[in-house]
Image (cartoon, rainbow, N blue to C red):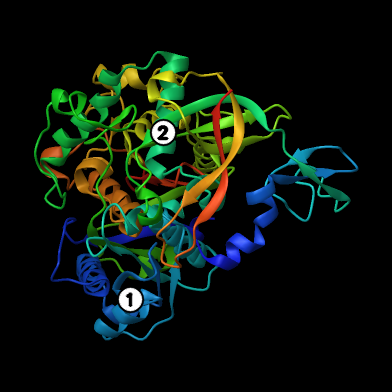
Amino acid sequence: MEPPKIWREKRERYLAIGIQCQDCKSKSFPKTSFCTKCSSSNITEYRLATSGKLLNFTKVTSTSKEMNSYAPFFVGIIELDDGIKVTGQIVDCKFEDLQDEMRVRMVFRVLARNGEEGLIRYGFKFTPE
Amino acid sequence: MSNHRVNIIGYGMTKFGEFYEENSSSLASKALMDSINNSVIEKNEIQAAFFGSFVSSSNSQSSIGVNCINECNMSIPVSRIEAGTASGAAAFHQAYLSLLSGLYDCVAVVGTEKLSDYVRNESIERILGATIDSHWEFEMGATLTSLYAILTKAHMKEFKTTLEQLASVPVKNHKNGVHNPNAQFRREISINRFLNAKRISDPIGRFDPATFCDGSSSVILASSDFIEKHTNLETTIPVLGAGQATDNLALHHRTSLTKLLATEYASKNAFKMADLTHSDINVAEVHDSFPIGEILAIEDIGFFAKGEGGKATENGETEINSNITINPGGGLKARGDPFGATGIAQIVEIVEQLSGRAKERQVDNKNYGLTQNVFGTGAMVYVNIFGESEVKR
Protein backbone atom coordinates (compact mmCIF):
# COMPACT_ATOMS: atom_id res chain seq x y z
CA MET A 1 0.00 0.00 0.00
CA GLU A 2 1.43 3.39 -0.99
CA PRO A 3 2.61 5.68 1.87
CA PRO A 4 0.31 8.63 0.93
CA LYS A 5 -2.71 6.35 1.26
CA ILE A 6 -1.62 5.16 4.70
CA TRP A 7 -0.91 8.76 5.75
CA ARG A 8 -4.33 9.93 4.52
CA GLU A 9 -6.06 7.21 6.53
CA LYS A 10 -3.83 7.44 9.62
CA ARG A 11 -6.62 8.37 12.03
CA GLU A 12 -8.80 5.48 10.86
CA ARG A 13 -5.93 2.98 10.66
CA TYR A 14 -4.02 3.88 13.84
CA LEU A 15 -6.72 5.29 16.10
CA ALA A 16 -9.87 3.55 14.74
CA ILE A 17 -11.62 6.88 14.21
CA GLY A 18 -14.93 7.03 12.34
CA ILE A 19 -17.56 9.75 12.17
CA GLN A 20 -20.83 10.52 13.90
CA CYS A 21 -23.50 12.73 12.34
CA GLN A 22 -24.63 15.51 14.70
CA ASP A 23 -28.00 15.74 12.90
CA CYS A 24 -29.21 12.13 12.56
CA LYS A 25 -26.72 10.67 15.11
CA SER A 26 -25.74 7.76 12.84
CA LYS A 27 -22.17 6.49 13.03
CA SER A 28 -20.02 5.22 10.21
CA PHE A 29 -16.55 3.93 9.38
CA PRO A 30 -14.29 4.75 7.54
CA LYS A 31 -14.36 8.55 7.77
CA THR A 32 -16.27 10.46 5.10
CA SER A 33 -16.95 14.18 4.58
CA PHE A 34 -20.70 13.63 4.73
CA CYS A 35 -22.95 11.47 6.86
CA THR A 36 -23.41 8.21 4.91
CA LYS A 37 -27.09 8.13 5.92
CA CYS A 38 -28.47 11.70 5.65
CA SER A 39 -25.60 13.37 3.72
CA SER A 40 -25.26 16.14 6.34
CA SER A 41 -21.79 17.64 6.63
CA ASN A 42 -22.42 18.37 10.33
CA ILE A 43 -20.21 15.51 11.50
CA THR A 44 -17.64 14.92 14.23
CA GLU A 45 -14.91 12.34 14.69
CA TYR A 46 -15.77 9.40 16.84
CA ARG A 47 -13.75 6.51 18.29
CA LEU A 48 -14.99 3.02 17.44
CA ALA A 49 -15.97 0.59 20.19
CA THR A 50 -13.00 -1.65 20.98
CA SER A 51 -14.87 -4.90 21.38
CA GLY A 52 -17.61 -6.74 19.60
CA LYS A 53 -18.65 -10.11 18.21
CA LEU A 54 -17.44 -12.21 15.29
CA LEU A 55 -20.23 -12.62 12.71
CA ASN A 56 -18.51 -14.61 9.94
CA PHE A 57 -14.99 -15.93 9.45
CA THR A 58 -12.71 -17.99 7.23
CA LYS A 59 -9.05 -18.75 6.60
CA VAL A 60 -6.76 -16.99 4.08
CA THR A 61 -4.01 -19.23 2.68
CA SER A 62 -2.73 -17.01 -0.12
CA THR A 63 -2.73 -13.25 -0.66
CA SER A 64 -0.50 -10.46 -1.98
CA LYS A 65 3.28 -10.48 -1.51
CA GLU A 66 3.39 -8.05 1.43
CA MET A 67 0.87 -10.05 3.50
CA ASN A 68 1.77 -13.59 2.37
CA SER A 69 4.37 -14.14 5.10
CA TYR A 70 1.55 -14.05 7.67
CA ALA A 71 -0.58 -16.66 5.84
CA PRO A 72 -2.40 -18.76 6.74
CA PHE A 73 -4.35 -16.30 8.88
CA PHE A 74 -8.01 -15.89 9.81
CA VAL A 75 -10.28 -13.10 8.66
CA GLY A 76 -13.85 -12.23 9.51
CA ILE A 77 -16.63 -9.66 9.74
CA ILE A 78 -16.91 -8.15 13.23
CA GLU A 79 -19.86 -6.23 14.62
CA LEU A 80 -18.52 -3.80 17.22
CA ASP A 81 -20.56 -2.98 20.31
CA ASP A 82 -21.51 0.40 18.77
CA GLY A 83 -23.12 -1.37 15.79
CA ILE A 84 -20.34 -0.60 13.29
CA LYS A 85 -19.25 -3.56 11.17
CA VAL A 86 -15.68 -4.00 9.96
CA THR A 87 -13.56 -6.66 8.27
CA GLY A 88 -10.43 -7.73 10.14
CA GLN A 89 -8.07 -10.53 11.07
CA ILE A 90 -8.53 -12.67 14.17
CA VAL A 91 -5.20 -13.47 15.80
CA ASP A 92 -3.67 -15.21 18.85
CA CYS A 93 -5.93 -18.25 18.49
CA LYS A 94 -6.36 -21.50 16.57
CA PHE A 95 -8.83 -21.83 13.68
CA GLU A 96 -10.68 -24.48 15.70
CA ASP A 97 -11.22 -21.92 18.49
CA LEU A 98 -13.23 -19.60 16.24
CA GLN A 99 -17.01 -19.61 16.53
CA ASP A 100 -19.81 -17.46 15.14
CA GLU A 101 -20.93 -14.82 17.66
CA MET A 102 -17.78 -15.17 19.80
CA ARG A 103 -16.62 -12.07 21.68
CA VAL A 104 -13.48 -10.34 20.35
CA ARG A 105 -11.54 -7.21 21.22
CA MET A 106 -9.55 -4.85 19.00
CA VAL A 107 -5.73 -4.98 19.11
CA PHE A 108 -3.05 -2.98 17.28
CA ARG A 109 -0.73 -5.09 15.11
CA VAL A 110 1.51 -5.26 12.06
CA LEU A 111 -0.61 -5.88 8.94
CA ALA A 112 2.00 -6.07 6.21
CA ARG A 113 5.71 -5.79 5.52
CA ASN A 114 8.13 -6.32 2.62
CA GLY A 115 5.89 -4.42 0.20
CA GLU A 116 7.36 -2.50 -2.71
CA GLU A 117 7.72 0.67 -0.60
CA GLY A 118 9.45 -1.15 2.25
CA LEU A 119 7.11 0.23 4.90
CA ILE A 120 5.78 -1.80 7.77
CA ARG A 121 2.05 -1.21 7.79
CA TYR A 122 0.07 -1.29 11.05
CA GLY A 123 -3.62 -1.45 11.81
CA PHE A 124 -6.25 -3.09 13.96
CA LYS A 125 -6.88 -6.81 14.24
CA PHE A 126 -9.01 -8.74 16.73
CA THR A 127 -8.32 -11.32 19.40
CA PRO A 128 -10.73 -13.53 21.41
CA GLU A 129 -11.87 -11.65 24.52
CA MET B 1 -39.43 1.57 -30.21
CA SER B 2 -38.89 -1.15 -32.80
CA ASN B 3 -36.62 1.08 -34.87
CA HIS B 4 -34.41 1.43 -31.85
CA ARG B 5 -34.09 -2.30 -31.22
CA VAL B 6 -30.47 -3.40 -30.83
CA ASN B 7 -29.46 -6.72 -32.39
CA ILE B 8 -26.39 -8.93 -32.36
CA ILE B 9 -25.38 -9.63 -35.96
CA GLY B 10 -22.00 -11.30 -35.48
CA TYR B 11 -19.86 -12.94 -32.82
CA GLY B 12 -16.43 -14.44 -32.37
CA MET B 13 -13.91 -15.41 -29.73
CA THR B 14 -10.48 -16.94 -29.26
CA LYS B 15 -10.03 -20.13 -27.34
CA PHE B 16 -9.54 -19.35 -23.63
CA GLY B 17 -6.39 -20.60 -21.92
CA GLU B 18 -2.71 -19.76 -21.49
CA PHE B 19 -1.20 -18.23 -24.62
CA TYR B 20 2.33 -17.10 -23.85
CA GLU B 21 3.03 -16.20 -27.49
CA GLU B 22 0.06 -13.79 -27.65
CA ASN B 23 -0.45 -10.37 -26.10
CA SER B 24 -3.68 -8.70 -25.07
CA SER B 25 -4.24 -6.75 -28.28
CA SER B 26 -3.33 -9.60 -30.64
CA LEU B 27 -5.97 -11.72 -28.92
CA ALA B 28 -8.46 -8.83 -29.16
CA SER B 29 -7.74 -8.37 -32.88
CA LYS B 30 -8.35 -12.05 -33.55
CA ALA B 31 -11.72 -11.97 -31.76
CA LEU B 32 -12.75 -8.71 -33.48
CA MET B 33 -11.86 -9.95 -36.99
CA ASP B 34 -13.59 -13.25 -36.19
CA SER B 35 -16.82 -11.45 -35.27
CA ILE B 36 -16.65 -9.13 -38.32
CA ASN B 37 -16.20 -12.13 -40.64
CA ASN B 38 -18.99 -13.97 -38.86
CA SER B 39 -21.36 -11.03 -39.35
CA VAL B 40 -20.80 -10.96 -43.13
CA ILE B 41 -20.67 -7.14 -43.13
CA GLU B 42 -17.78 -5.01 -44.36
CA LYS B 43 -15.18 -3.89 -41.85
CA ASN B 44 -15.76 -0.22 -42.74
CA GLU B 45 -19.44 -0.44 -41.76
CA ILE B 46 -18.48 -0.54 -38.07
CA GLN B 47 -18.69 2.98 -36.67
CA ALA B 48 -17.18 2.59 -33.17
CA ALA B 49 -15.74 -0.05 -30.83
CA PHE B 50 -16.06 -0.56 -27.08
CA PHE B 51 -13.41 -2.57 -25.24
CA GLY B 52 -13.99 -4.31 -21.94
CA SER B 53 -10.74 -4.89 -20.08
CA PHE B 54 -10.05 -4.93 -16.34
CA VAL B 55 -6.25 -4.85 -16.01
CA SER B 56 -5.10 -1.67 -17.70
CA SER B 57 -1.50 -2.77 -17.58
CA SER B 58 -2.18 -5.95 -19.58
CA ASN B 59 0.41 -5.69 -22.33
CA SER B 60 1.79 -2.60 -20.46
CA GLN B 61 -0.61 -0.50 -22.46
CA SER B 62 -3.58 1.56 -21.40
CA SER B 63 -6.60 1.90 -23.69
CA ILE B 64 -5.98 -1.45 -25.31
CA GLY B 65 -8.54 -0.70 -28.03
CA VAL B 66 -6.18 1.62 -29.90
CA ASN B 67 -3.62 -1.18 -30.48
CA CYS B 68 -6.34 -3.51 -31.62
CA ILE B 69 -7.95 -1.04 -34.03
CA ASN B 70 -4.50 -0.19 -35.47
CA GLU B 71 -3.74 -3.87 -35.97
CA CYS B 72 -7.05 -4.36 -37.76
CA ASN B 73 -6.35 -1.32 -39.97
CA MET B 74 -9.50 0.47 -38.83
CA SER B 75 -9.90 4.10 -37.79
CA ILE B 76 -12.99 4.46 -35.62
CA PRO B 77 -13.65 5.90 -32.15
CA VAL B 78 -12.69 3.45 -29.39
CA SER B 79 -13.26 3.44 -25.63
CA ARG B 80 -12.07 1.12 -22.92
CA ILE B 81 -14.67 0.39 -20.24
CA GLU B 82 -13.60 -0.99 -16.87
CA ALA B 83 -15.81 -2.68 -14.31
CA GLY B 84 -13.41 -5.23 -12.83
CA THR B 85 -14.51 -8.80 -13.48
CA ALA B 86 -17.67 -7.44 -15.16
CA SER B 87 -15.80 -5.26 -17.67
CA GLY B 88 -17.10 -7.27 -20.63
CA ALA B 89 -20.75 -6.75 -19.76
CA ALA B 90 -20.05 -3.11 -18.90
CA ALA B 91 -18.56 -2.50 -22.37
CA PHE B 92 -21.54 -4.29 -23.92
CA HIS B 93 -23.89 -2.03 -21.96
CA GLN B 94 -22.19 1.15 -23.22
CA ALA B 95 -22.23 -0.15 -26.80
CA TYR B 96 -25.92 -0.94 -26.41
CA LEU B 97 -26.62 2.59 -25.13
CA SER B 98 -24.67 4.11 -28.03
CA LEU B 99 -27.05 2.42 -30.49
CA LEU B 100 -30.14 3.30 -28.45
CA SER B 101 -29.05 6.94 -28.45
CA GLY B 102 -29.21 6.88 -32.24
CA LEU B 103 -25.60 8.05 -32.58
CA TYR B 104 -24.43 4.81 -34.24
CA ASP B 105 -26.06 2.03 -36.26
CA CYS B 106 -23.31 -0.56 -36.04
CA VAL B 107 -20.63 -0.99 -33.35
CA ALA B 108 -18.25 -3.68 -32.13
CA VAL B 109 -17.75 -4.80 -28.51
CA VAL B 110 -14.55 -6.60 -27.58
CA GLY B 111 -13.62 -8.12 -24.22
CA THR B 112 -9.98 -8.99 -23.68
CA GLU B 113 -7.58 -9.97 -20.90
CA LYS B 114 -4.08 -11.42 -20.65
CA LEU B 115 -3.61 -12.85 -17.17
CA SER B 116 -0.99 -15.57 -17.64
CA ASP B 117 1.67 -12.83 -17.49
CA TYR B 118 0.95 -12.25 -13.79
CA VAL B 119 2.48 -14.10 -10.88
CA ARG B 120 0.13 -16.14 -8.70
CA ASN B 121 0.30 -15.61 -4.90
CA GLU B 122 1.43 -12.05 -5.57
CA SER B 123 0.07 -9.73 -8.23
CA ILE B 124 -3.12 -11.59 -9.18
CA GLU B 125 -4.34 -11.41 -5.57
CA ARG B 126 -3.66 -7.66 -5.54
CA ILE B 127 -5.48 -7.19 -8.86
CA LEU B 128 -8.50 -9.08 -7.51
CA GLY B 129 -8.21 -7.11 -4.27
CA ALA B 130 -9.34 -4.11 -6.32
CA THR B 131 -12.71 -5.79 -6.97
CA ILE B 132 -13.51 -5.87 -3.24
CA ASP B 133 -13.14 -2.89 -0.87
CA SER B 134 -9.41 -2.51 -1.45
CA HIS B 135 -8.72 -0.34 1.64
CA TRP B 136 -11.04 -1.86 4.25
CA GLU B 137 -11.34 -5.47 3.11
CA PHE B 138 -8.26 -6.36 1.06
CA GLU B 139 -5.65 -4.32 2.95
CA MET B 140 -7.09 -5.59 6.26
CA GLY B 141 -6.42 -9.16 5.14
CA ALA B 142 -9.48 -10.36 3.24
CA THR B 143 -9.20 -11.66 -0.32
CA LEU B 144 -11.83 -12.19 -3.01
CA THR B 145 -11.66 -15.94 -2.31
CA SER B 146 -12.08 -15.47 1.44
CA LEU B 147 -15.12 -13.24 0.97
CA TYR B 148 -16.71 -15.84 -1.32
CA ALA B 149 -15.92 -18.34 1.46
CA ILE B 150 -17.91 -16.16 3.87
CA LEU B 151 -20.81 -15.97 1.36
CA THR B 152 -20.64 -19.77 1.01
CA LYS B 153 -20.69 -20.35 4.78
CA ALA B 154 -23.61 -17.95 5.23
CA HIS B 155 -25.65 -19.91 2.65
CA MET B 156 -24.67 -23.25 4.21
CA LYS B 157 -25.68 -22.01 7.63
CA GLU B 158 -29.02 -20.47 6.69
CA PHE B 159 -30.25 -23.03 4.12
CA LYS B 160 -28.31 -26.19 5.07
CA THR B 161 -26.62 -26.11 1.66
CA THR B 162 -24.06 -28.96 1.56
CA LEU B 163 -20.55 -29.25 0.13
CA GLU B 164 -21.94 -31.93 -2.23
CA GLN B 165 -24.55 -29.49 -3.55
CA LEU B 166 -21.89 -26.82 -4.01
CA ALA B 167 -19.56 -29.24 -5.82
CA SER B 168 -22.37 -30.25 -8.19
CA VAL B 169 -22.05 -26.77 -9.77
CA PRO B 170 -18.50 -27.22 -11.17
CA VAL B 171 -19.15 -30.92 -11.91
CA LYS B 172 -22.04 -29.91 -14.21
CA ASN B 173 -20.12 -27.01 -15.75
CA HIS B 174 -17.10 -29.18 -16.56
CA LYS B 175 -19.45 -31.73 -18.12
CA ASN B 176 -20.86 -28.97 -20.35
CA GLY B 177 -17.40 -27.58 -21.13
CA VAL B 178 -16.36 -30.86 -22.79
CA HIS B 179 -18.42 -29.80 -25.82
CA ASN B 180 -17.23 -26.18 -25.96
CA PRO B 181 -14.28 -25.96 -28.40
CA ASN B 182 -13.26 -22.58 -26.91
CA ALA B 183 -13.19 -23.74 -23.27
CA GLN B 184 -9.88 -23.92 -21.40
CA PHE B 185 -10.79 -27.22 -19.68
CA ARG B 186 -12.60 -29.78 -21.81
CA ARG B 187 -12.82 -32.70 -19.43
CA GLU B 188 -15.19 -33.93 -16.79
CA ILE B 189 -14.10 -33.77 -13.15
CA SER B 190 -15.57 -36.14 -10.57
CA ILE B 191 -17.36 -34.79 -7.50
CA ASN B 192 -14.83 -36.50 -5.21
CA ARG B 193 -12.02 -34.49 -6.76
CA PHE B 194 -13.75 -31.34 -5.50
CA LEU B 195 -14.77 -32.78 -2.14
CA ASN B 196 -11.34 -34.23 -1.32
CA ALA B 197 -9.36 -31.16 -2.40
CA LYS B 198 -7.42 -29.12 0.12
CA ARG B 199 -9.42 -26.14 1.49
CA ILE B 200 -7.82 -22.88 0.34
CA SER B 201 -10.30 -20.72 2.23
CA ASP B 202 -12.66 -22.86 4.26
CA PRO B 203 -15.12 -24.10 2.86
CA ILE B 204 -13.74 -23.26 -0.62
CA GLY B 205 -11.53 -26.02 -2.01
CA ARG B 206 -8.51 -25.91 -4.29
CA PHE B 207 -10.50 -26.73 -7.45
CA ASP B 208 -13.60 -24.64 -6.74
CA PRO B 209 -12.65 -21.23 -8.23
CA ALA B 210 -12.64 -20.51 -11.95
CA THR B 211 -9.09 -20.04 -13.27
CA PHE B 212 -7.67 -16.72 -14.46
CA CYS B 213 -6.51 -17.04 -18.06
CA ASP B 214 -6.05 -15.33 -21.43
CA GLY B 215 -8.67 -14.77 -24.08
CA SER B 216 -10.80 -12.39 -26.10
CA SER B 217 -14.38 -12.34 -27.30
CA SER B 218 -16.36 -9.99 -29.50
CA VAL B 219 -19.87 -9.25 -30.76
CA ILE B 220 -21.16 -6.85 -33.42
CA LEU B 221 -24.28 -4.84 -32.55
CA ALA B 222 -26.56 -3.20 -35.10
CA SER B 223 -29.76 -1.18 -35.06
CA SER B 224 -32.99 -2.42 -36.64
CA ASP B 225 -32.54 0.22 -39.38
CA PHE B 226 -29.17 -1.32 -40.23
CA ILE B 227 -30.71 -4.79 -40.38
CA GLU B 228 -33.46 -3.67 -42.73
CA LYS B 229 -30.80 -2.48 -45.18
CA HIS B 230 -28.72 -5.67 -44.90
CA THR B 231 -30.90 -8.59 -45.93
CA ASN B 232 -28.07 -11.12 -46.11
CA LEU B 233 -27.34 -11.23 -42.35
CA GLU B 234 -27.20 -14.74 -40.90
CA THR B 235 -27.48 -13.70 -37.24
CA THR B 236 -30.03 -11.24 -35.86
CA ILE B 237 -30.49 -11.87 -32.16
CA PRO B 238 -32.35 -8.96 -30.50
CA VAL B 239 -31.30 -7.58 -27.10
CA LEU B 240 -34.63 -7.47 -25.27
CA GLY B 241 -33.59 -6.29 -21.83
CA ALA B 242 -30.53 -4.81 -20.17
CA GLY B 243 -30.27 -4.24 -16.42
CA GLN B 244 -27.47 -3.02 -14.21
CA ALA B 245 -27.41 -2.54 -10.44
CA THR B 246 -25.00 -1.63 -7.68
CA ASP B 247 -24.68 -2.77 -4.05
CA ASN B 248 -22.36 -1.90 -1.14
CA LEU B 249 -18.75 -2.59 -2.08
CA ALA B 250 -17.82 -4.15 1.28
CA LEU B 251 -19.61 -7.29 2.46
CA HIS B 252 -19.63 -5.90 6.00
CA HIS B 253 -21.90 -3.07 4.84
CA ARG B 254 -24.48 -5.37 3.21
CA THR B 255 -27.81 -6.19 4.80
CA SER B 256 -27.76 -9.82 3.60
CA LEU B 257 -24.97 -12.28 2.87
CA THR B 258 -27.29 -14.92 1.42
CA LYS B 259 -28.27 -12.98 -1.68
CA LEU B 260 -26.68 -10.56 -4.12
CA LEU B 261 -29.09 -7.63 -4.14
CA ALA B 262 -27.50 -6.24 -7.31
CA THR B 263 -28.38 -9.44 -9.20
CA GLU B 264 -31.96 -9.19 -7.98
CA TYR B 265 -32.32 -5.54 -9.05
CA ALA B 266 -30.45 -5.89 -12.36
CA SER B 267 -32.56 -8.88 -13.41
CA LYS B 268 -35.80 -7.18 -12.30
CA ASN B 269 -34.92 -4.20 -14.51
CA ALA B 270 -33.97 -6.42 -17.44
CA PHE B 271 -37.16 -8.50 -17.16
CA LYS B 272 -39.27 -5.36 -16.96
CA MET B 273 -37.66 -3.93 -20.09
CA ALA B 274 -38.12 -7.22 -21.96
CA ASP B 275 -41.67 -7.66 -20.62
CA LEU B 276 -40.76 -11.22 -19.61
CA THR B 277 -40.38 -13.19 -16.38
CA HIS B 278 -37.76 -15.71 -15.21
CA SER B 279 -40.04 -18.57 -16.31
CA ASP B 280 -39.74 -17.44 -19.95
CA ILE B 281 -35.96 -17.97 -19.99
CA ASN B 282 -34.72 -21.28 -21.43
CA VAL B 283 -30.98 -20.88 -21.13
CA ALA B 284 -28.65 -18.68 -19.04
CA GLU B 285 -24.94 -18.03 -18.62
CA VAL B 286 -24.24 -16.87 -15.05
CA HIS B 287 -21.12 -15.83 -13.14
CA ASP B 288 -19.85 -19.05 -11.48
CA SER B 289 -16.39 -17.77 -10.50
CA PHE B 290 -17.03 -19.74 -7.27
CA PRO B 291 -19.73 -22.45 -6.87
CA ILE B 292 -21.79 -20.24 -4.54
CA GLY B 293 -21.83 -17.60 -7.31
CA GLU B 294 -23.97 -19.81 -9.53
CA ILE B 295 -26.26 -20.84 -6.65
CA LEU B 296 -26.84 -17.21 -5.64
CA ALA B 297 -27.38 -16.23 -9.29
CA ILE B 298 -30.07 -18.83 -10.03
CA GLU B 299 -31.89 -17.89 -6.82
CA ASP B 300 -31.56 -14.11 -7.12
CA ILE B 301 -32.61 -14.05 -10.80
CA GLY B 302 -35.66 -16.04 -9.68
CA PHE B 303 -35.17 -19.41 -11.40
CA PHE B 304 -35.33 -21.12 -7.98
CA ALA B 305 -36.70 -20.10 -4.59
CA LYS B 306 -34.19 -18.67 -2.09
CA GLY B 307 -32.24 -21.50 -0.48
CA GLU B 308 -33.22 -24.08 -3.14
CA GLY B 309 -30.38 -23.43 -5.62
CA GLY B 310 -28.00 -26.03 -4.17
CA LYS B 311 -30.62 -28.77 -4.05
CA ALA B 312 -31.83 -27.94 -7.57
CA THR B 313 -28.30 -28.16 -8.98
CA GLU B 314 -27.62 -31.45 -7.22
CA ASN B 315 -30.91 -32.83 -8.61
CA GLY B 316 -29.86 -31.96 -12.17
CA GLU B 317 -32.46 -29.22 -12.59
CA THR B 318 -29.93 -26.90 -14.25
CA GLU B 319 -28.38 -29.36 -16.69
CA ILE B 320 -28.68 -28.95 -20.46
CA ASN B 321 -32.32 -29.42 -21.52
CA SER B 322 -33.67 -29.44 -17.99
CA ASN B 323 -36.29 -26.83 -17.12
CA ILE B 324 -33.66 -24.07 -17.13
CA THR B 325 -30.24 -24.71 -18.68
CA ILE B 326 -27.48 -22.97 -16.71
CA ASN B 327 -24.00 -22.44 -18.18
CA PRO B 328 -24.20 -24.75 -21.21
CA GLY B 329 -20.85 -23.38 -22.39
CA GLY B 330 -19.15 -24.60 -19.21
CA GLY B 331 -19.43 -21.33 -17.30
CA LEU B 332 -16.38 -19.47 -16.09
CA LYS B 333 -15.26 -22.68 -14.41
CA ALA B 334 -14.64 -24.80 -17.53
CA ARG B 335 -14.30 -21.98 -20.08
CA GLY B 336 -11.70 -20.15 -17.99
CA ASP B 337 -12.01 -16.54 -16.78
CA PRO B 338 -10.14 -13.81 -18.68
CA PHE B 339 -12.01 -11.09 -16.76
CA GLY B 340 -12.91 -8.57 -19.50
CA ALA B 341 -13.55 -11.33 -22.05
CA THR B 342 -15.91 -13.31 -19.82
CA GLY B 343 -18.98 -11.06 -20.05
CA ILE B 344 -18.83 -11.08 -23.88
CA ALA B 345 -18.10 -14.84 -24.01
CA GLN B 346 -21.30 -15.42 -22.02
CA ILE B 347 -23.21 -13.42 -24.66
CA VAL B 348 -21.47 -15.34 -27.49
CA GLU B 349 -22.66 -18.61 -25.92
CA ILE B 350 -26.27 -17.39 -25.62
CA VAL B 351 -26.25 -16.10 -29.21
CA GLU B 352 -24.96 -19.49 -30.44
CA GLN B 353 -27.66 -21.23 -28.42
CA LEU B 354 -30.50 -18.98 -29.64
CA SER B 355 -29.37 -19.30 -33.27
CA GLY B 356 -29.24 -23.10 -32.95
CA ARG B 357 -25.51 -23.39 -33.65
CA ALA B 358 -24.30 -24.79 -30.31
CA LYS B 359 -23.93 -28.35 -31.70
CA GLU B 360 -23.50 -31.04 -28.99
CA ARG B 361 -24.45 -28.60 -26.23
CA GLN B 362 -27.49 -27.15 -28.04
CA VAL B 363 -30.63 -26.68 -25.94
CA ASP B 364 -33.95 -27.72 -27.52
CA ASN B 365 -36.07 -24.80 -26.30
CA LYS B 366 -34.41 -21.57 -27.32
CA ASN B 367 -36.88 -18.71 -27.22
CA TYR B 368 -35.08 -16.59 -24.65
CA GLY B 369 -31.62 -16.49 -23.09
CA LEU B 370 -30.00 -14.50 -20.25
CA THR B 371 -26.50 -13.51 -19.15
CA GLN B 372 -25.32 -12.34 -15.70
CA ASN B 373 -21.83 -10.88 -15.14
CA VAL B 374 -20.61 -9.93 -11.63
CA PHE B 375 -18.01 -7.45 -10.36
CA GLY B 376 -16.15 -8.75 -7.29
CA THR B 377 -18.54 -10.07 -4.66
CA GLY B 378 -21.55 -8.46 -6.35
CA ALA B 379 -21.03 -4.71 -5.91
CA MET B 380 -22.02 -4.38 -9.58
CA VAL B 381 -24.07 -6.81 -11.67
CA TYR B 382 -25.11 -6.70 -15.33
CA VAL B 383 -28.00 -8.81 -16.65
CA ASN B 384 -28.96 -9.02 -20.34
CA ILE B 385 -31.89 -10.80 -21.98
CA PHE B 386 -31.88 -11.97 -25.60
CA GLY B 387 -34.60 -13.38 -27.89
CA GLU B 388 -34.42 -15.98 -30.62
CA SER B 389 -35.68 -13.56 -33.26
CA GLU B 390 -37.62 -10.36 -33.78
CA VAL B 391 -40.46 -12.25 -35.48
CA LYS B 392 -41.57 -14.11 -32.35
CA ARG B 393 -42.45 -10.89 -30.57
Image quadrant where residue B320 sits = top left
* Label 1 neighbour load within 10 Å: few <14, some 14-19, many 20+: few
* Quadrant the C terminus of chain B occupies: top left
Question: Can you identify the residue that label 2 sits on?
Answer: B297
Residue at x 26%, y 35% (from the top left corner):
B208
| Quarter occupied by residue B156 | top left
Residue B101: give x, y in percent of width and height. Answer: 55, 66
Chain identifier of the residue bearing label 1 in the image: B
Q: In screen coordinates, is A67 left or right of B245?
A: left
Q: Is residue A78 above or below residue B31?
A: above
Q: Does residue A1 lie above or below B131 as drawn?
A: below
Q: Amino acid at mark 2?
A: Ala
Asked if badge 2 and badge 1 are on a common chain, one would say yes
Q: How far, Cα to Cα, is label 2 from label 1?
A: 34 Å
- Residue closest to the eye, B44 or A109: A109
Q: In the image, residue B80 lies at what x, y percent?
A: 43, 70
- Report the residue that reaches farthest toward the top: B160
Residue B260 drawn above or below residue B132 = above
Q: Which amino acid is tagged 1?
A: Ser
Q: Say whether residue B18 is left or right of residue B369.
A: left
Q: Which secondary structure, mark 2?
A: helix
CB-based contact (under 8 Å), mark 2 and mark 1: no
> Which one is in front, A109 or B357?
A109
Instruction: Name the one closer to the observer, B340 or B203.
Output: B203
Label located before the other in sequence (2 or 1):
1
Place of residue A35 in the rendered image (x, y in percent of width and height, measured from the top left): 79, 47
| Number of the label disc, if any, that sits on residue B60 | 1
What residue sits 43% from the left and 67% below the top?
B225
- Quarter of the image for residue B65 reads bottom left
Looking at the rendering, in which quadrant would you find the N terminus of chain B?
A: bottom right
